[in-house]
Image (cartoon, rainbow, N blue to C red):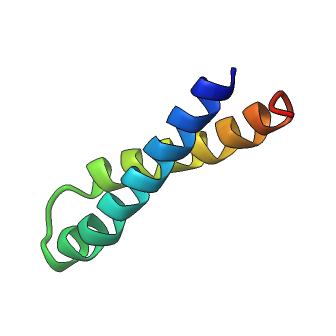
Amino acid sequence: MNLLFQLTVFSFVAFSFLLVIGVPVVFAGNYGKSTLYTGIGFWFFLVFAIGILNSFVV
């Protein structure tokens, strides 16, 4: 369970860095907004998954 939590946190941090770069690029153009919203939805999923997994890690 600890390894799963660590992998989830790592993917959250990596995906957050991708969003920091990707959000301004998508908003500068007039394309890909649905992809952006999907990415933000996945980011929120990772936030909730980390919160749930955090309750199982001692």
> Considering depth in this image, is 4 or 50 the residue closer to the camera?
4
Compared to residue 54, the image places residue 15 above or below, namely below
Quadrant in the picture for the C terminus? top right
Compared to residue 28, the image places residue 39 above or below, namely above
In terms of image quadrants, where is residue 22?
A: bottom left
Compared to residue 48, the image places residue 5 above or below, namely above
Residue at the spot x=39%, y=44% of the render? Answer: 38
Q: Is residue 1 left or right of residue 28?
A: right
Location of residue 34 in the rendering, given as x and y in whole percent from the top left corner: 30, 50
Quadrant in the picture for the N terminus? top right
In terms of image quadrants, where is residue 53?
A: top right
Compared to residue 7, the image places residue 40 above or below, namely below
Q: Is residue 32 left or right of residue 53?
A: left
Residue at the spot x=80%, y=32% of the render? Answer: 57
> Considering depth in this image, is 49 or 4 the residue closer to the camera?
4
Residue at the spot x=34%, y=70% of the render? Answer: 20
Location of residue 9 in the rendering, given as x and y in whole percent from the top left corner: 56, 44
